[in-house]
Image (cartoon, rainbow, N blue to C red):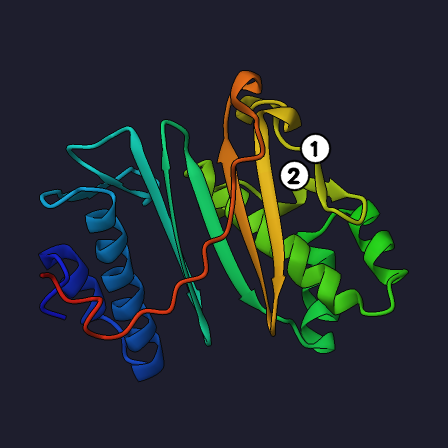
Amino acid sequence: MAELHTSERQRARRFSCVEALHLFVVAHAALHWALRGAGLNSYGFASTPQGKPFLIDHPDLHFNLSHTRGLIAVALGADHPMGVDVERLAPPETYRELAPRVMTPAECAYMAAQAAPEDRFTQLWSAKEALMKATGLGFGLPPREIEFDGPAANLSQLPPEHGAPQDWQIWCQRLPGHWLALASQTSQASQTGDLCLQPITLTPQDLLSP
């Protein structure tokens, strides 16, 4: 907890679930590790009216966090908003309950035809959450207003005020027991497929400030 900023410690104290508290603390310590690796030693946090955090003195450096049991993700990028989401594979009952609420009819039809529809559901849900977080709206952008199609989950539809589908890069990766998704808004000129995953194993000592 000592490595976290005051605002992060205040948020951490609100957790009543020990596991959720542990994930929050480790994820935010990993964020500080990543920011130090990017050359930042002094920085402060603030949040937009919609609740998305940003770096006060470094507005061109965007970051996002996601964590679930067994996996933490930290996304860093320059110049363009981005979002990241990690999800444990959904059990069949979760897929059956939630898919009609958060997926479009076309997405539901596609996943129902798959041998493991819950796997496709988890892939699309992580992609939608990453995009919703990248816009800064979170659930203020209804997930059924976003649509992905094809095996690679290509973005095909979103509200026009957030740009055209081709204005976004969406990158999904199946991991053991999880799906991970990154979303970044970028110009056509700079769409070079530069979203990537860098797996890192950190020790508790790595997360401490030098």
Q: Is residue 174 left or right of residue 20?
A: right
Instruction: Judge by depth and name the residue closer to the eye, 82 or 138.
Output: 82
Determine the secondary structure under disc 1.
strand
Residue at 12%, 57% in the rendered image: 5
Tell me if mark 1 has few (under 14), some (14-19) or many (20+) residues whose alpha carbon lies within 10 angstroms of its own.
some
Q: Position of residue 2 (x, y in %)?
A: 9, 68
Question: Mark on residue 14?
Answer: none
Q: Is residue 63 left or right of residue 97?
A: left
Work out whether mark 2 precedes mark 1 in sequence or the reverse, and give the earlier one: 2
**Mark 1 and mark 2 in contact (Cβ < 8 Å)?**
yes
Indicate the amino acid at tag 2: Glu
Q: Position of residue 113 (x, y in %)?
A: 90, 60
Determine the secondary structure under disc 2.
helix
Q: Which residue is mark 1?
A: 157
Q: Which residue is mark 2?
A: 145
Residue at 74%, 47% in the rendered image: 152
Q: Position of residue 181 (x, y in %)?
A: 56, 52
Indicate the amino acid at tag 1: Gln
- Against 53, residue 8 (above or below) is below
Instruction: Judge by depth and name the residue closer to the eye, 19 or 194.
Output: 194
Residue 30, picture quadrant: bottom left
- Extreme bottom residue here? 18
Q: CA distance from mark 2 to mark 1?
A: 7 Å
Res 137 seen here = no
Res 162 seen here = yes
- Against 11, residue 167 (above or below) is above
- Extreme top residue here? 189
Residue at 29%, 28% in the rendered image: 60
